[in-house]
Image (cartoon, rainbow, N blue to C red):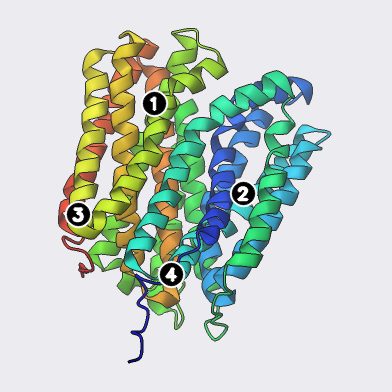
Amino acid sequence: MPSPEPTPESEPRSWAPLLAVCAGYFMVILDVTIINVAVPVIGRELAASLTGIQWITDGYTLVFAGFLLTGGALGDRLGNRRVFCCGVAVFTLASAACALAPSAPFLIGARLLEGLGAALIVPGSLALLQQAYPASAARARAFGLWGSMAGIAASAGPLLGGLLVSTAGWRWVFLINLPVGAACLALTLRHVAPSPRRTDRALDWPAQCAVVAAVALLTAALNEAGRRGWSDAAVLAGMGLAALAATAFVVRERLARSPALPLSLLRSRAMSGGAAIGLLFNFGFYGMIFTASLQFQHERGFSALGTGLALFPAVGMTMFASVLSARLTRRTGDRPLVVSGMLLAALGLAGWAVAGADAAYPLLVAPLMAVGFGTSFALTGSTATVMGAAPQAYSGAASALFNTTRQIGSATGVALGGSLLATATDYNTGLTISMAIGALAYLAAAALAWRCVPAKPGHRVS
């Protein structure tokens, strides 16, 4: 009697593709936050102006956020593995250039190139995981661990940066990417199967330019809002131009024969709702990390290393939450996990706001753990919702959309937190208001999840 055909659930799994993809994603997110503790030293050693220091930090984020959809479109057309590997190579070489930078302008240019490499890495990362793990259970675990990398990298950045700057010097903040990038490239080429290429689908360059302009202008305006204030003319002009560029993108996509992101995808409740949930929980999480980092250092006198350790309870929960949510999703579906995760994170930030910014640190450990756990617990389901709503041919574009909205959420959370800290009567008041707004964002994400995330495993929301 012939043996039964193996099903996707019963086929042996290799976690090498997950390790490869997560290594690339970890580098990208780490470089968003690790630079913060190093930039004062870099400014002194390279004699950088205040504007130069700002560009060392923000130039990377601008290019990264602006070119995500372009990276997704290139991955769908040329093959996600090929574009992912190109992104890792560009990112690693740019990191070497950053480490060897003789001047601030050179470092800024290398950081911009790093951002371009990051924009090629991230969209392909989710598409490659979806390709490598077709079985729903394995894919859920892969998405969960991928998502936990963001929280771990973002929160560990200040801790690792503080260690490197205080021991080996600021250039090691970039040199650490070289072995990680090389290992990521080797693992990807050896263990990740080539992706299908769809060269018949032309790149819609007018739409790509419009979305790059929209995201870059919006990110720049949000970054400046934290420093200049929300009513500043330059901030308002940037937001207005971003809205104009976004309108041009929508008009172009309606007319294009081969759109970069078909508008029919956005009419899917799961796709648009999942992207909005990503924006909201990144707003809450990264706003909390930013404002807490400043308050710990300015008001409590923590060092950069001490601040990283103080934020560790949020980091420590992310891996546990992602593994647990991946195991539970097969029985419960994604909706209960996303809703409960967002409610728990909202409770954490609300508890911090009620306790007050000057509460003893031990009282803040539980809120930090709740935010870290809740965000990571919900990320697996929201990622699966967005990726499950997209046809395979547009997996790169769906990943790019999800990560673009998350980057916008991060920039908005940081900008609003910075603005509140700058305009409130004191740091403690600004932090309390920021935590309360973050809690409301998590509550809004929970409400969206109840409406947009599939209720049962395998069920789709149109």
**Quadrant of residue 31 in the image?**
top right
Residue that label 1 marks: 313
Say which quadrant the C terminus sits in: bottom left
| Disc number lying in front (3 or 1) | 1
Label 1 or label 2, whichever comes before in sequence order: 2
Question: Could you tell me if the residues under marks 3 and 2 are in contact, i.e. CB atoms within 8 Å?
Answer: no
| Circle 1 SS class | helix
Asked if residue 330 lies left or right of residue 120, the reply is left
Residue 50 location (% of width, % of height): 65, 25
Question: Could you tell me if the residues under marks 3 and 1 are in contact, i.e. CB atoms within 8 Å?
Answer: no
- Residue at the right extreme of this rendering: 102
Residue 216 location (% of width, % of height): 52, 49
Label 3 or label 4, whichever comes before in sequence order: 3
Residue in view at x 40 percent, y 19 percent? 421
Tell me the tag on residue 115: 2
Q: From the viewer's perspective, is residue 379 above or below residue 354?
A: below
Residue 296 location (% of width, % of height): 45, 14
Tell me the tag on residue 335: 3
| Circle 2 SS class | helix
